[in-house]
DNA sequence: TTAATTGCAAAAACTTTGCAATCGG
DNA sequence: CCGATTGCAAAGTTTTTGCAATTAA
């Protein structure tokens, strides 16, 4: 899904919920798109503040991200100590993450077999899965090489 | 591993690091053991405060949990919104979690095949895994039944 | 018009930290 | 004795919220 497509779907989502189509919300989406696919909220807030003269306040950014999570365009994907890293889901299919604890690099991967096994487990426990998250923490190749 | 065994290993860990063996640290371990295997820190702090007349202050509890994480007896296992759920790892083998978003129930499971697949993925990316966490969010059987 | 949204500042929730007193080795 | 630990209160982070003014429909 491209950004424009996402925005029009989000517009539809807002309308359906009886919410309003405001400029700020769409500017925040653009900014997240510019920022990159992984972000921490406070970091994003500061980045936006440094870039532009106030397209939206901190509260509006927090509130909009909550909406985007509800809509499904933003997911909490990594929790490392007290940090929470969010992901902007634009057109990407579902995937999991490898996180380098040394340099912070995030690698995305997908294995159908892992998904299938999860479904099997859920069946066994009569558990109805809604979503999941797999985080693998370790050392990436570059960092490993530098160490040697 | 039983609690007493864990405590003596922790004692060894402290000694090795040049840290001190204090009564408070071991009382906190006992309390976590009494509390159950999954906890949130603030909740634990309040629980301990209500139980006893101060075996340790909030700071000491936070500091001790940090030590226990370093030692490996406590792990951050679930992140749900702003809540972080820790797990007390006593003798349990490694496992993953199913989390019911309706009632909060936590089900532990383990699938060797999932672990193996993760290793394969890491190999592909030349990534050296240190640890991982798989959280599956959904509705448990009981909650599903109640709904119907 | 009117209900949702915004920005602000204040509050809330969670976690860390500086410091003086205390305790363990 | 010396360095680690504790408790406390203060400060730091991150996130939410009440409210008056503003804006979208």
Image: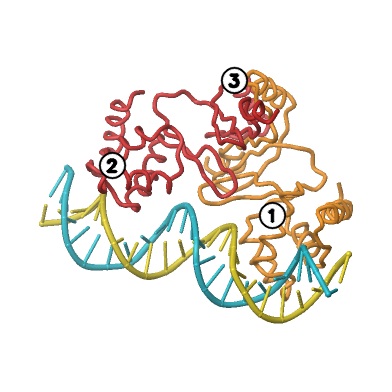
Chain colours: A red, B orange, C yellow, D cyan
Residues tagged 1 and 2 counted as in contact (Cβ below 8 A): no
Q: In what element is the residue under mark 3? A: loop
Residue at (73% x, 49% y) in the render: B70
Residue at (55% x, 51% y) in the render: B83
* B4 and B141: which is toward the camera: B4
The answer to which image quadrant residue A3 occupies is top left
How far, Cα to Cα, is label 2 from label 3? 34 Å
Residue B46 location in percent, x, y?
Answer: 64, 67
Residue B33 location in percent, x, y?
Answer: 78, 57
Residue at (74% x, 50% y) in the render: B88
Q: Quadrant location of the C terminus of chain A? A: top right
Instruction: Give the residue number, with chain letter if any, for mark 2.
Output: A25
- Residue A40 against residue B6 in the figure, above or below: above
Report whether mark 2 lies on the same chain as mark 3: yes
The answer to which image quadrant residue A139 occupies is top right
Q: How crowded is mark 1: few (under 14 residues within 10 Å), some or many (20 or more)?
A: some
Q: In what element is the residue under mark 1? A: helix
The answer to which image quadrant residue B131 occupies is top right
- Residue B58 against residue A66 in the figure, above or below: below
Dot in front, 3 or 1: 1
Instruction: Give the residue number, with chain letter if any, for mark 1.
Output: B66
Residue at (63% x, 23% y) in the render: A114
Specify the subunit that label 2 lies on.
A
Pick whichever of labels 2 and 3 is earlier in the sequence.
2
Instruction: Give the residue number, with chain letter if any, for mark 3.
Output: A111
Residues tagged 2 and 3 counted as in contact (Cβ below 8 A): no
How far, Cα to Cα, is label 3 from label 1? 34 Å
Residue A92 location in percent, x, y?
Answer: 44, 24
- Residue A106 against residue A51 in the figure, above or below: above
Q: Residue B100 carries which label?
A: none
Drawn side of residue C6 relative to residue B32, left or right: left
């Amino acid at each position: 899904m491209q950004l424009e497509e996402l925005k029009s779907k989000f517009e539809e989502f807002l309308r359906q919920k009886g919410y309003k189509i405001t400029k700020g919300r769409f500017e925040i989406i653009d900014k997240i798109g510019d920022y990159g696919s992984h972000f921490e909220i406070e970091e994003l807030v500061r980045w936006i503040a440094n870039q532009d003269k106030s397209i939206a306040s901190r509260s509006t950014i927090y509130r909009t991200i909550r909406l985007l999570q509800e809509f499904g365009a933003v997911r909490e994907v990594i929790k490392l100590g007290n940090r929470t890293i969010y992901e902007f889901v634009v057109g990407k299919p579902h995937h999991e993450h490898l996180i380098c604890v040394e340099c912070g690099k995030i690698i995305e991967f997908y294995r159908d077999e892992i998904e299938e096994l999860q479904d099997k487990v859920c069946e066994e426990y009569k558990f109805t899965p809604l979503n999941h998250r797999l985080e693998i923490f370790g050392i990436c190749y570059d960092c490993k090489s530098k160490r040697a």
